[in-house]
Amino acid sequence: MAKKRSISPIFKRAAAHIFTKPATTKYPFVKPHLPDDARGEPMYEIKACNIIDIGSGNSVGLSIDVRSIVGSSCRVCARDCPTGAIQIVEVEGKGRPQINLNKCIFCHQCVETCPRHAIKASDLYELATTDKSCLIMKPNVQSETKETPK
Amino acid sequence: MSNNKIDILNVVESKLGSKVQIQPGHLSTGSIIANNGLHREVLKAMIEADEKTGIIAISGLDLGENLGVYYHFRTSNALVTIKTEVPKTNPIIQTIIDLHPGAAFHELEVTDLLGVIFEGNKPEGHFVLSEYWPQGVYPLRKDVKANEIKLSPPQETNKPAEDPRQVKIIIGPQHPALLEPEKFSVTVDGETVTKVEPRIGYVHRGIEKASESRTYLQDVYLVERICGICNSIHAAAFVEAVEKIIKVDIPPRAKYLRIVALELNRLHSHLLTLGHAGLEIGYETLFQYFWRDREPIMDLIELTSGNRVYSSLMAVGGVRRDIRAEDIPKIKSVLKTLRGQLPFYRQIYTDEPTLRLRMKDVGVLSRKDALALSVVGPVARGSGVDIDVRKDEPYEAYAEIPFKEIVYKDGDTWSRMNVRMDEVEESINIIEYVVDHLPSGPIRLNLPRSVPAGEAVNRVEAPRGELFYYVKANGTDKPDRVKVRTPTFANLPSFLKTAIGESIADVPANFVSLDPCFSCTDR
Amino acid sequence: MIDYLLLIFRILVFPGFTFILLLTLFCDWIERKIEARIQNRVGPMVAGPAGILQPLADFIKLLTKEDIEPREAKKLVFRYAPLAAFAIMMFAFCFIPIDGGSVLSFGSTVGGFNGDLIIILAFATIANFLLFLAGWASCNPYGTIGSARVLTQFLGYDIPLFLLALTPAFIAGSLQIANIASAQATTFLPFIFLAPWAFVMFVITMQAELEKDPFDVPHSESELVGGLETEYTGAKLAFLHLTRDVQIVFGSALVVELFLGGPYGPVFFGPSWIWYSLWFVLKVIGVVLISEYITTVVARFRIDQVLSGNWRILLPASLISLILTVALVTWVYPLLV
């Protein structure tokens, strides 16, 4: 071998590491610092949504045909959601999106497509719960803004 | 330097003349329509003219009355497609594995999913589909609906080894050495491996079929989830293919931003593999060190895209998010720290005696075999074959960025790992160049949701090798056919070759140097 | 009467069964913490202060799990081999002087009897053999291959181990462990300084006997799933793990007794047996640290490299070391003293 072989550097490095601070973040005692626009839970703002008539659109699944949305300028969040996590339900005679966090992949396509910016991005990620029904975000109440610990 | 592109089509034309129909410029370099077994003649002419001819993929499509079988080949500087068609009533075509052994897996897959029978390459049982799948039902045909399949009981049995002295050890499907499930039946004579029989398809989710019932907008997210490690690359390959069909050129800032996402993906994937290799040979400390250095890269991916793993940055027409100017110093400082760690790892690879004992001269793949089996990525570059899509057919803005192509000659596990380590440094160079030279301008074009009829092929360099997409559009907002050929699918036959003759104790180290990603393989 | 009660106390509590058990759990915690710190992570941190109760928590957790027996396994061996191995290892500790004298003494003032070095090395071999039988009796292909590898490895490395263990015996002039340890105390010169090559080789051979990296082959998950432990669950697995941990402490204790002066060290005030126990514990922890450092820093050899390293390198080297040490002790050192 042309190159000179010496003692592997790992012996010194390993011994030195015994005395250095570990690189682990001790979650949940210490929370990590997230960037501002991390993709967390999509939050829905009821006042801004534009749907004015619910119609009989089939918003379950992915076979939404563009032509069946009659007269309304919206329902695009449900149409564009890749997993079909958004269903349109009737609230006070108007159609509102109901986001099922079980199916949501947090891609924020709905945030992007909504023409009225009714769905906003947030960076909440501690969404685990023991009750599956908590994960279906019903649109009849405004989502409370929760503070992420920084 | 002679312009090889025109040479190949000229060569074929001069040899076969009017028997085939040549369309230069269609589907990258050109496509050749050759029915009635003439595809073998075309292939023979191409192999004689250029030794680097290798198969990329075989796309099967349902064209109504006929089944289309498209052979995509790469030569030194060209991508040529040979199109043939067979009637659905008699879907028999001649095999090409005697001319080019690397085509074996591709033919078996087309048989399984579309029902085309290749004379001379008959599978035993299913190849990609599960044993419960009913016979005679071919999922990629248009008349088969996914929710109407009735499963039938399996007929496959585990056969013992033919020679009674040899023992068949089954590695997988669930095994600590494998990250994802696949079954390998390894026949050993004492401690030496004599045969390896793979059974893939445990993670087959039918993504190609699923993409036909979703719009292009939703398909970007679907295709991203073929693989968790190289997710941006899949998305980029898909949107580029769609942009080629629409024939639109995206703004330069979008191209540069895409490169940042792609190279960050390559960085974290290579660091993952280098750590995982350490784990397989019992070197947990190296594994922990590599993954500790990988964490800041995941934080960078989160900074640029909002999520640590699935960056979802790509969209048809550009990228979805921009990099803020105040983030660029953070990106550069993380990359500088990573670059400072690399000499330590390089020295371990050269000096650590136990690592050299486990990795040197293990799993040797000769250059001849690498070319015959048409392997891609670091596996090929570790055996002396210099193929890299970023240099051979530059996409996005790679033509403007200076970087080196890494090639090692020995062909063993150690060389392949070294290729990946050097590529880490090159990726750092590329990202630093890109963030220094970001052009200004828009990041996304507003394109209509429907795509005009047409077809396109696209190749992208994933961390594991060359990733290939073939997209066919029919004028609606849903694609007609999306064909994905992932790099591990092309590299897997090389493992069947390199494991033979070695001790079974070398199988884990050999296997992990391929960098297998079975989610990609099975789709 | 008091003597018998004292004897029972010494066997069961201190320095016998309970003390060794607590020392084992403590050394397990130290191993895991050191390995974690070398790898730049935290290690056990939740169970007890700084995670010190983690090995105990793991043991209790395994005891509460369901105990599954394969139908084909040989019942008697499958059930009782781990327990028997554990019992034999614990019994071997009775001959190692911990607080200045061994627990069991047969007519000797310092404890033990003439030739007990060979006996406890034989006990260690029998315990390993019982572990091999445990894997063999589980009738599982991974268990069979794993236990075959265990057998090949420890039988091969037993020979250099015996030869190297005889080196301090030659220097001290006795085959009784307690005599070897006290010989180092009277001359204030631990044998590590007289025969350092033997110490280094003994530590390496001990690594191979204890199946730690780089000789980790029987436990390599990437090849063998679980090795000989594949079919074991619940309480039996708890005892298998405990046996392995006790073996590690036993190996370290042997190194301490043979080369590092045993429990003897400076006594500052009060009864001497407290100080002797303290020195013993500190020296054992030191050896565990060295052994764990070697484990963490290197990769794993292949089985054929392990075997060729033994028969081609270690065995001739240990023979040469024995001859060299005997020559030095007989002719050279008396000239220097």
Image (cartoon, rainbow, N blue to C red):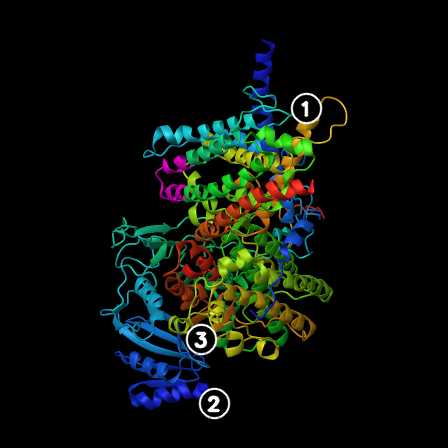
Crowding at dot 1, Cα within 10 Å, few <14 / some 14-19 / many 20+, comes out as: some
Q: Nearer the viewer, residue B3 or C326?
A: C326
Q: Chain of mark 3?
A: B
Rendered view: B108 above or below C111: below
Q: Is residue C178 found left or right of A147 in the rendered image?
A: left
Q: Earlier in the sequence, mark 3 or mark 2?
A: 2
Report the mark closest to the observer, 2 or 1. Answer: 1
Q: Position of residue B434 (x, y in %)?
A: 65, 72
> Would you say residue C144 sits in the magenta stretch?
yes
Of badges 3 and 1, nearer the viewer stands: 1
Q: Which residue is mark 3?
A: B456
| Crowd rating for badge 2 (residues with CA inside 10 Å; few <14, some 14–19, many 20+) | few
> On what subunit does the disc labeled 1 rest?
C
Residue under label 2? B2
Residue linked to disc 1: C273
Q: Which secondary structure, mark 1? A: helix
Please identify the dominant SS of the magenta region. helix
Q: Circle 3 sits in a helix, a strand or a loop, which is it?
A: strand
B149 left or right of C20?
A: left
Q: What residue do we see at 49% from left, 52% from top?
A: C313
- Residue at 50% from the left image edge and 39% from the top image edge: C162
Reply above or below: B371 against C281.
below
Q: Which residues are magenta?
A: C132-148
Do the CB atoms of the residues marked 3 and 2 lie less than 8 Å apart?
no
| Separation of marks 3 and 2 at Cα, in angstroms | 26 Å
Of B466 and A82, which appears nearest the observer? B466
Queried whether the magenta region covers residue B181, the answer comes back as no
